[in-house]
Image (tube, rainbow, N blue to C red):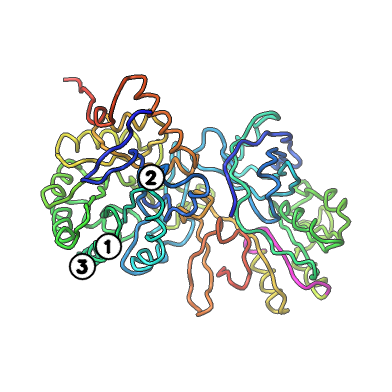
Amino acid sequence: MADLSVKVAGVEFANPLIAASGTFGFGREYSEFYPLSTLGGISCKGITLKKRLGNPPPRIAETPGGMLNAVGLQNPGVDHFIENDLPWLKQQGTVIIANIAGNTYEEYAQMAEKLSDTNVDMIEMNISCPNVKSGGVQFGTSCEGVGAITREVRKKCTKPLIVKLSPNVTDIAEIARSAEAEGADAVSMINTITGMRIDIEIARPIIHNNTGGLSGPAVFPVAVRMVWQVANAVKIPIIGMGGISKWQDAVEILMAGATALQIGTCLFTDPYSPVKILDGLNKYMEAKNIKTLSEITGSVIPWT
Amino acid sequence: MKYDSQKFRVLHNKEIAPGIFDMWVENPELAELAKPGQFAHILVPGKTLRRPISICEADKTCLRLVYQIKGEGTELLSKVRVGDELDIIAPLGNGFDIRPDKTYCFIGGGIGVPPMLYASKQKQKPIVITGFRSKPLVILQGDFRKNNCELYLTTDDGTAGRKAFVTDVLNEVLDQVDEVCACGPLPMLKAISAICEAAGKPCQISLEERMGCGIGACLVCACAVRKNDGSTDYVHVCKDGPVFDSKEVVF
């Protein structure tokens, strides 16, 4: 067995696979399939200061090689998470990451402060939810916005802070630099790419929110490109995500510069995909005589 | 809840009406767990999202899934051959709550008819009302008859059975039953719910929504419900349903 462990911002993960926020709830459903310790970590469903109902259905549409979603941050609120979900999650033998979203600096800072008083392992700041006006995306699409929100949350956040980046920007490397400059310990990327599908029988968007976030294999090359660009721009670790669905994809995004990775949409296709990805990674490392995953991170040799 | 994703062997997959297919799949470990009203979440090779299909019948080893071609995924499913294997998560969701001491009327409309076969088989001589748009789309009448039920057939255009809506028949038989279970198009379920509510009879309805994970993690298949305090909340068809008390549902 190869050593699949990784370290991100001082936090040890038994393996590089983290369930992506919004695809895994608070873990209970998938624990029917395998122990959650199968995963290196879990990024929990995005939480807000107060409970949110989310968007009216339909909230999902299939696309070639992927899907659109617009759940709209349905969640029970940060206090409910801390009281009802976190204690159980912390017993599962995996790294627990709280994913937070908000409307104002104060909301983000308040949640970071509350969560810093718990035993959650890391905080992932979502400033890239494309599906709600108050999902923080207003902070996530400019360098000034990302810098300012990171600075404010950093003041209250004593946990390792991951900033989750939006791909719906002109220059993601500049955005990542702003997060790093204001104290982010890591970045995770990419969130979904804004998209739209229309039901041609009724001339209505399939998703009630009209637009949604595109995920799945279709976005994978975009994720690889963006991870590579950011890896060349910052020193903090990158948690890569966006359409990873098989072990070859995992190797590829690590080569582009990721230290760990998140998987999401592939869980809907195959709940057992994490087990298969880990098995493939292990065999690849043994065949190539790779001792640690850090040897793969950023190992791509670009053409000059 | 117990569920898993496993391989099922396809034993049968035949068109029984234009665009409607009758499929039997085998997996003894999971099939025997099924209850009426639950569904199977089928991975169609090449597709990102699974297709949720209601369970039409189940025995110790097999599930019967009667489905309609609605898009690319179900079209691919219709081409699956006997002997092929399908990856299916099943059984999922909460089924109908059918009590031994109560009498029932089971109502199905269109492709909402198949799950009512499984549900109605739980009772001796139940009343079953099936409604379709037109004669070519009429399915499963022989299966219901084998089950010795009081069977009603309606079509919108009168080309088979009575030219009526299922609600017309329901109004005639409602006095004879304690409770109603229904599956079908939303306008039909809304009308049935209103009739039952007016008569003070409980009604369970099976809903459909575009789904992601199928197990309650991704929260996409939202259904608006009325809570006891009068407020509205979103619950999820896959995990909280697909069967709901009609009085809870906000149509």
Q: In the drawing, does residue A237 fall left or right of residue A134? A: left
What number is the disc on residue A115? 1
Residue at 31% across, 55% down = A99
Where disc 2 sits, the SS reads strand
- Numbered marks: total: 3
Segment colored magenta: B176-188
Q: Position of residue B59 (x, y in %)?
A: 76, 46
Please identify the quarter of the rendering in which residue A188 is found: top left
According to the picture, the residue beneath numbered tag 2 turns out to be A214
Q: Nearer the viewer, mark 3 or mark 1?
A: 1
Q: Amino acid at mark 3?
A: Glu
Q: In the drawing, does residue A33 fall left or right of residue B181? A: left
Crowding near the residue tagged with mark 3, few <14, some 14–19, many ≥20 C-alpha atoms within 10 Å: some
Q: Chain of mark 2?
A: A
Residue B183 on the magenta span: yes
Q: Amino acid at mark 2?
A: Leu
Crowding near the residue tagged with mark 2, few <14, some 14–19, many ≥20 C-alpha atoms within 10 Å: many
1 or 2: tag closer to the N-terminus: 1
3 or 1: tag closer to the N-terminus: 3
CB atoms of marks 3 and 1 within 8 Å: no
Q: Quadrant of the C terminus of chain A?
A: top left
Residue B72 on the magenta span: no
Q: Chain of mark 1?
A: A
Where disc 3 sits, the SS reads helix
Distance of label 2 from label 3 (alpha carbons): 29 Å
Residue A211 higher or lower than B128, as above or below: above
Q: Position of residue A14 (x, y in %)?
A: 34, 40
Distance of label 3 from label 1 (alpha carbons): 14 Å
Q: Amino acid at mark 1?
A: Leu
Q: Nearer the viewer, mark 1 or mark 2?
A: 1
- The front one of A6 and A246 is A6
CB atoms of marks 1 and 2 within 8 Å: no
